[in-house]
């Protein structure tokens, strides 16, 4: 496994993390035994960075992680846990209530990285009001570092201006070979300000691996039913990219998922993909995306192919 620093800190995190959205109704991994085996395999292979959120399974994901780490006798200091607080939990009194419940589910006395999942756009809580509450959690030792998920750069700046003694160490953004808007502002901003970019949906929910035919995509019954990438206006061109990914993967003896993740890792040293895994085998596959690099020629071939995509989010 390869490791890098979390933002501007001296905390070392694996270059590929374990996303835990799958421990929820959204992805259907609700069997604790399976969840524990996934976590165990990831840890065995050197993954020490786990990303979850309070809303994943309404706390189920955090609960599974807390139980698994305890039963696996994992040294708490060897693991970096990131969790996310949703925008509607950001009134000052709710911030402390939500974090306390998160700590209980995770069975830990502190959260390594707490990110805001999205801005409080429905409740209009002033940015400095909730940022000062979050900073207070750092000051009293319940949270070590702060981050922002799905925040526009302008609001990242606004949030940072509210902080007195700490800074934002991580930005979590959607970034994959088919969806690249983050490279316009977020990645350059993170590189300039020494922040980690946590790339969520790094495999575009499986679209860019070529796992599903056009007919298969029409039959998906999970949250991808309404996912734009799998819709008829987009998926045929995504499959063209997936075929190129497959061809390059065969040259390296790697899987398409490993190539797609390696492309992200090669893109910038601040990027840490956080793919999910619905089986120990997928966790092992994801861990195999590091320890090697695409050649410049193959990286460029993927870059050029992906730039030809014109993804539309107007699906009805």
Image: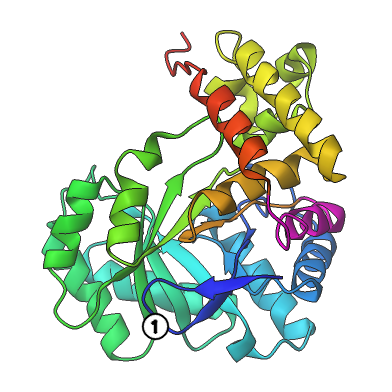
Can residue 118 be seen here?
no
| Front one among 32 and 214 | 214
**285 drawn magenta:** yes
| Front one among 3 and 18 | 3
Can residue 70 be seen here?
yes
Q: Is residue 261 above or below residue 15?
A: above
Residue 294, image x and y in percent? 68, 47
Residue at figure coordinates x 23%, y 82% from the top left:
136
Q: Is residue 4 above or below residue 60?
A: below
Q: In terms of image quadrants, where is residue 14?
A: bottom right
Residue 283, image x and y in percent? 78, 58
Residue at figure coordinates x 28%, y 60% from the top left:
192
Quarter of the image that includes the N terminus? bottom right
**67 drawn magenta:** no
Residue 37, image x and y in percent? 84, 66
Residue 93, image x and y in percent? 24, 72
How many numbered circles are shown? 1
Other-residue count near label 1 (Cα within 10 Å), few / some / many at <14 / 14–19 / ≥20: some
How was this image coloured?
rainbow
| Front one among 132 and 31 | 132
Q: Which residue is mark 1?
A: 144
Dot 1 falls on a residue whose secondary structure is: strand
- Find the magenta span and give its range: 278-293
Residue at figure coordinates x 51%, y 18% from the top left:
308
Q: In terms of image quadrants, where is residue 141?
A: bottom left
| Front one among 107 and 156 | 156
Residue at figure coordinates x 33%, y 58% from the top left:
190
């Amino acid at each position: 496994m390869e490791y890098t620093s979390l933002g501007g800190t001296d905390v070392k995190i694996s270059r590929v993390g374990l996303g835990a959205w799958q421990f929820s109704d959204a992805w259907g991994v609700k069997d604790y035994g399976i969840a524990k085996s996934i976590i165990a395999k990831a840890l065995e292979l050197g993954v020490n960075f786990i990303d979850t959120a309070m809303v994943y399974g309404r706390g189920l994901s955090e609960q599974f992680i807390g139980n698994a780490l305890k039963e696996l006798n994992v040294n708490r200091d060897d693991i970096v846990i990131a969790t996310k607080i949703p925008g509607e939990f950001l009134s000052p009194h709710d911030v402390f209530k939500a974090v306390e419940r998160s700590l209980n589910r995770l069975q830990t006395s502190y959260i390594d990285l707490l990110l805001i999942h999205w801005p409080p756009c429905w409740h209009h809580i002033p940015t400095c009001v909730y940022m000062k509450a979050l900073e207070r959690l750092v000051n009293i030792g319940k949270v070590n570092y702060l981050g922002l998920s799905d925040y526009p750069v302008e609001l990242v700046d606004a949030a940072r201006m509210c902080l007195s003694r700490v800074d934002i160490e991580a930005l979590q953004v959607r970034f994959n070979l088919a969806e690249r808007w983050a490279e316009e502002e977020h990645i350059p901003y993170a590189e300039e300000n020494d922040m980690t970019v946590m790339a969520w949906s790094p495999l575009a929910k499986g679209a860019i691996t070529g796992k599903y035919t056009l007919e298969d995509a029409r039959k998906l019954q999970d949250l991808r039913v309404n996912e734009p990438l799998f819709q008829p206006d987009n998926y045929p061109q995504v499959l063209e990219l997936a075929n190129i990914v497959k061809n390059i993967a065969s040259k390296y003896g790697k899987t398409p998922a490993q190539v797609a993740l390696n492309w992200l890792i090669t893109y910038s040293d601040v990027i840490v993909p956080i793919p999910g895994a619905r089986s120990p085998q997928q966790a092992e596959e994801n861990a195999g995306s590091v320890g090697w690099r695409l050649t410049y020629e193959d990286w460029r071939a993927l870059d050029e192919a992906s730039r030809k995509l014109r993804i539309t989010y107007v699906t009805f």
